[in-house]
Image (spheres, rainbow, N blue to C red):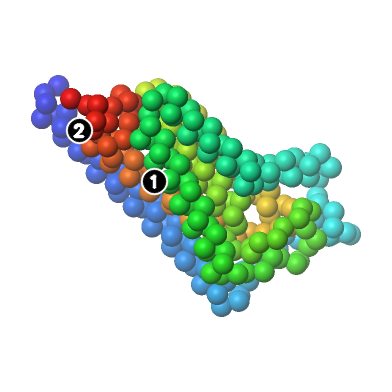
Amino acid sequence: MTATGTTGRWARRSDTRILVTLLIVTVALASFAYIASEVVEGHPLAIDRWLLLQLRSVADPGLSIGPRWFAQAMIDFTALGGGTVLTLVTTLVTGYLMARRKIALAAFVASSIVAGSLLTALLKIAFARARPDIVPHLVEVSSASFPSGHAMNSAMVYLTGAALLASAEPSRRVRVFLIGAALVLTLLIGFSRIFLGVHFPTDVVAGWAIGIAWAVASSWVAAILQRRHAIEGVEGTTTSTAR
């Protein structure tokens, strides 16, 4: 293949990636904006009350549907979106990249996740939505409800970490596994918050929306920096090492 053909192919791929990135981010932010407007106006969506009640026993709303082990599994899943676990995961991902001598990429991952966590805290303060009182909570909570910190932070940490790890992996199979595993974890953690009665469904959807938009945008910025050799990619070179 000629150099011109190769350049044209990469240009088309870049254009497609930009369009897909913009589409995902736009849809995610539009979804968040719609839900946020309802929250500000104090109009809970009908699905909030309906879904929370569907996950509880009709005779006793304090009891969740399904066997006892399923409720315990939801408690275990929700712990994967807590601050302690997410901090540990971020540390491990950063340490792994540093061990592979991808220092600039490790710094980018850590800074992206930390900035996202700060955004989560600011949004909670700004909206200050009370926790749902439709059903009894099955775990202790203390912060504001909107957006779901577990849903938003898990999307940021797992999806951003997986996407940026994948950007430095030559194997397509490994990249697909990393992204797929992160997506499954994010969805399970978000659902667990609804199941446990500590979040409205719209809290979780809003958290997913911002978290996914953040992860996609971070991946896109990382790809641009990797093409410019500002941070390491598959080849592991940066501006300082590339010649």
**Amino acid type of the residue tagged 1 in the rendering:** Ser
User: In the rendered image of this protein, does residue 26 appear above or below residue 166?
Assistant: below
Query: Measuring 34% from the left and 40% from the top, which residue is drawn there?
Result: 222
User: In the rendered image of this protein, does residue 149 appear above or below residue 82?
Assistant: below
Task: For marks 2 and 1, give the one nearer the viewer.
Answer: 1
| Residue 21 x, y percent position in the rendering | 35, 48
Q: Is residue 219 visible?
A: yes
- Which sits earlier in the primary sequence, circle 2 or circle 1? 2
**Amino acid type of the residue tagged 2 in the rendering:** Arg
Snapshot quadrant of residue 142: bottom right
Q: Secondary structure at mark 1?
A: helix
* Total tally of numbered discs in the picture: 2
Q: Which corner quadrant holds the C terminus? A: top left
Query: Measuring 56% from the left and 67% from the top, which residue is drawn there?
Result: 125
Q: Secondary structure at mark 2?
A: helix
Viewer-proximal residue, 89 or 211?
89
Q: Which corner quadrant holds the N terminus? A: top left
Snapshot quadrant of residue 238: top left
| Residue 28 x, y percent position in the rendering | 45, 56
User: Is there a contact, CB below 8 Å, between mark 2 and mark 1?
Assistant: no
Marking on residue 54:
none
Q: Which residue is tagged 2?
A: 9
Query: Measuring 88% from the left and 59% from the top, which residue is drawn there?
Result: 60
Viewer-proximal residue, 240 or 132?
240
Q: Residue furthest bottom?
A: 41
Q: Which residue is tagged 1?
A: 218
Q: Residue furthest right?
A: 59
